[in-house]
Image (cartoon, rainbow, N blue to C red):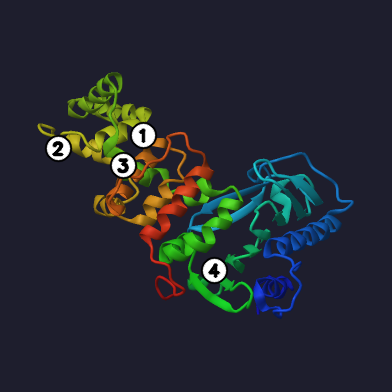
Amino acid sequence: MRLGLTVLPFSLLLALALGAAPATAPTTAQTPEQILAQRKLEEQKEQAQKVLGLPVMPRKKIGELIQFTIEPGDELVIRPRIGRTERSVVPIQGLPGQAVVAIGGDQPNTPEGATFVQFEYSDFSRPDEVFRRTQLFASAASMQISRDVESLAGSSSVSMIQSYGSDDPGTACRLYVQVFAPISDDLQTKLSLTAPSFVELRKRYPREARQYLDPMLRDLQQASVLLAPDAKIANQVFGNESKPDAILTERINAATAKFDADDFKVRQSASKALDELGEPAALALRKADRTGWSIDRSNGVDAFLAKFDSKPPAETNQLKSDPAFLLDCLYSDDPSTRAGALVELGNIVGKPVSLAPDADLTGRAELVDRLYPLLFRPSTQPTTQP
């Protein structure tokens, strides 16, 4: 049984168009493209009927309607940014269509009072697809994101479910995938993958995540929020490329020198001075030459760096050669993180990898898709077993 995808006559009609009809069939038989256009029109009319009479909200980005966050425990949590909303049509900024949104709750106009969030977006703009439908439902107990696609290349159904407070924490996050062949509609790929959390699911199954899960999140305009790595970790990995200017260098030297003072209060002020400089100082101090430093200065700098370092140096060095991590870095809003990832990706594939410094998320996603087959072998089997 398909996951959320209704069996449609499109595959049968397509089979007839591609030669399953008798040889005596009239030469005026519809082409696959004509059949697709007809089916798309039927789906668009059906969608128009579903939203007929619904109130229409002002155009918004998805992130203005719904908040996506990675919570402690690496769970993906979805909350509304707007208050209680009856089922309404919302034109989506940056996307070619409309969404239908509903938010329920006991306290109108307050996100805190919401008991559920429902979102559905249908895309008919792609020339080789009948439709691409992305749906989201979230409550206090769980959230689910799913996407159904029907196209000339076949059809697919992908769904990710994250349960909160699950009786089986090891399988609290689940990814289901079904891919069907064109014409015959035979099931080609069926996956059921589990992990304790959203973050662990992507780590455990990097190939499947990038092939099936990530495109859904990109469609929801959440690539830089959910797919980009933690900024602290990225800065650790690529921080050695940072070059502080003369003013910052002078302020860092003045602050660290205080760790050698005889007066305890002066030594305490060294930590405060570094805290005021923040992340830029941490990036510079990670590669600092410690020749001639006292134990007090080294210990003081280490304590400061610990506030910014999320992983041991050995782990961050491994991330430099981890293709899954490097691809995620291309979704980062930080140009230096993307630049560092491009260098390392070029080392892995054996040729330079380039991307315009001001490339938007669409351009970055296209590069990820081009690099993906060079880094992960296509397969219908999971990368690892649960």
Q: Residues within 10 Å of mark 3 (few under 14, many from 20)?
A: many
Disc 1 versus disc 4: distance between alpha carbons?
36 Å
Disc 3 versus disc 2: distance between alpha carbons?
27 Å
Residue placed under numbered mark 1 in the picture: 279
Would you say residue 85 is visible in this rendering? yes
**Front: mark 2 or 1:** 1
First in sequence, mark 4 or 3: give its number.
4
Residue placed under numbered mark 4 in the picture: 175
As drawn, 130 above or below 13:
above
Identify residue type, mark 4: Leu
Identify residue type, mark 1: Glu
Which SS class for mark 1? helix
Residue placed under numbered mark 2 in the picture: 295
Q: Quadrant of the C terminus?
A: bottom left
- Residue 221 on image: x %, y %: 59, 47
Confirm or deny contact between disc 3 and disc 2 (CB under 8 A).
Answer: no
Identify residue type, mark 3: Phe
Which residue is painted at 38% across and 66% down in the image? 377
Which residue is painted at 35% across and 41% down in the image? 235
As drawn, 56 above or below 123:
above
Report the front residue among 198 and 95.
95
Q: Residues within 10 Å of mark 2 (few under 14, many from 20)?
A: few
